[in-house]
Image (cartoon, rainbow, N blue to C red):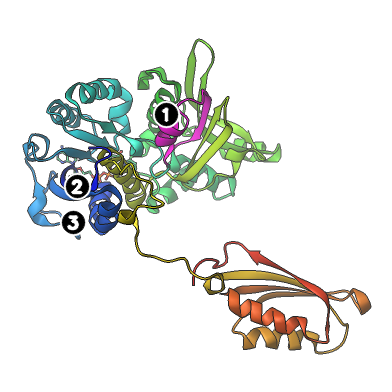
Amino acid sequence: MRNRRASDRRSVRIGLLGCGTVGQAVVRTLTGSAATIERATGHRLEVGPILVRDPSKERPGIDPALITTDPAAVIEDPSVTLVVEVMGGLDPTLDHLRTALRRGASVVTANKQLLSRHGPELLAMAEQAGGEMRFEASACGAVPVIKVLRESLLAAEVTAVTGIVNGTTNFILTEMAKGGGGYDEVLARAQALGYAEADPTEDVGGADAAAKMAILSSIAFHARVHLDDVPYEGIDRLQSEDIERAASLGFVVKLLGVARADDGSISVRVYPALVPRGHRLASVGGADNAVLIESRATREIMLVGPGAGGDETASAVVADVLAIVGTPQWSFLHNALVDSGRSVAPAGETTSAFYVRMSVADRPGVLARVASVFAEEGLSIRTVVQSGSGDEASLVLILHAGLERRMEAAMARVRALDDVRGEPVVLRVLGSGEGGS
Ligand SMILES: NC(=O)c1ccc[n+]([C@@H]2O[C@H](COP(=O)([O-])OP(=O)(O)OC[C@H]3O[C@@H](n4cnc5c(N)ncnc54)[C@H](OP(=O)(O)O)[C@@H]3O)[C@@H](O)[C@H]2O)c1
């Protein structure tokens, strides 16, 4: 399906196994972004049959005519050339995927348990029948770590992959480190907030992280690492006291997946570990995932982002679908087909928050005169610090986000005030509404 010319444009029928949290988000993304996808790939992606257990469930935005309880409608129909597996579990999922792959369909799956046990067999079947199998969402949700390992770093000789690959446990450990309570109390809160399953055993016991590390290390080291090859410990026996003691010694406790390749062998393990507070992985908090990849060529590269969630995981699933369908060989930069028609906004029409420092005359009413200039230009002040006296008097302001051209106009007027000495310093403030107008 790859690298087709415009004249090869065609419709690709996608069947889904499962339509829960991830499946519904996949359908929403495929339909919501249909025009963009067609422009960028040259293919019209059509959502075909969707397998579920209970067809009577509410599925907002999903055409009920597509819902089926007959697996054959997805896995055996030759018009379905790409099967997205988001039903989870091993049985009957494994057999469904074998059937689809055997007839040459391509498969995208988010199923870490399946991949970490049966990945090599399924990939071999795909190769034999001329299909493709991709599984980005099976490790670290939205974070495109598999694509980076298998494509960008293919020849970089990866020597280590260290990851926070389970969001539930990272959330629990982050809360415990903040003094948010003991393990049981924080786990109950994580369940109430939807960060932990009703049965959290796979997550807190380390099995989920072990499955992801088996997948990541297989790709990173071009090896076959089965889930059974990964010894794991979880966080279920961790005590608040040790988290506090670690903190007092300058460490945070994280559940880590640690995979290393030496000359002749590989080791892959999952365990809770003390991470020095200055280490990059120490700052990864909440339910985020992060993977630190070390390679001879690139030294360290860290990828961070949401490891779960419907839309987040669907983003990785859809990325795999698009990788299978393929984008045209022609460059994105000059191809009229992929031009969305959006233009670049003039710099003055973008917004930013600002820091301003100026030397001012030490006389009454200075602040009011400066503030009124900003107010007349529609810019509001968030923070003011006045300091010094005489020739040393200075004024530091932080302004809320506003249009760049209004800021330029305001500063031209501020510079012209009698009260202002020398050239004011103006810097932009990140994360306070900067961006397009
Ligand atoms: N949720 C996440 O944040 C996340 C993140 C990364 C990876 N994943 C992976 O993505 C997959 C799907 O997760 P999810 O959260 O979307 O699960 P989910 O909400 O429980 O949805 C599962 C779907 O599969 C269907 N299904 C399950 N067993 C079936 C069977 N035997 N026959 C027919 N249909 C069946 C269910 O049908 P009904 O609707 O009729 O019950 C449901 O539509 C799993 O492999 C999971 O590990 C999920």
- Disc 3 residue type (three-letter): Arg
Which numbered dot is residue 59? Answer: 3
Earlier residue among tags 2 and 3: 2
Residue 212 x/y as whole percent: 39, 31
> Image quadrant of ligand 1?
top left
Q: Are marks 1 and 2 in contact (CB under 8 Å)?
A: no
Residue 433 x/y as whole percent: 54, 68
Q: Which residue is mark 1?
A: 216
In magenta segment, residue 179: no
Q: Quadrant of the N terminus?
A: top left
Residue 135 x/y as whole percent: 31, 34
Is 85 on the left or on the right of 365, as rendered?
A: left
Residue drawn 66% across the image and 83% down it: 374
- Disc 1 residue type (three-letter): Leu
Which-is-in-front pick, marks 3 and 1?
1
Which-is-in-front pick, marks 2 and 3?
2
Q: Residues within 10 Å of mark 1 (few under 14, many from 20)?
A: many
Along the viewing direction, whichever of 346 and 238 lies nearer the viewer: 346
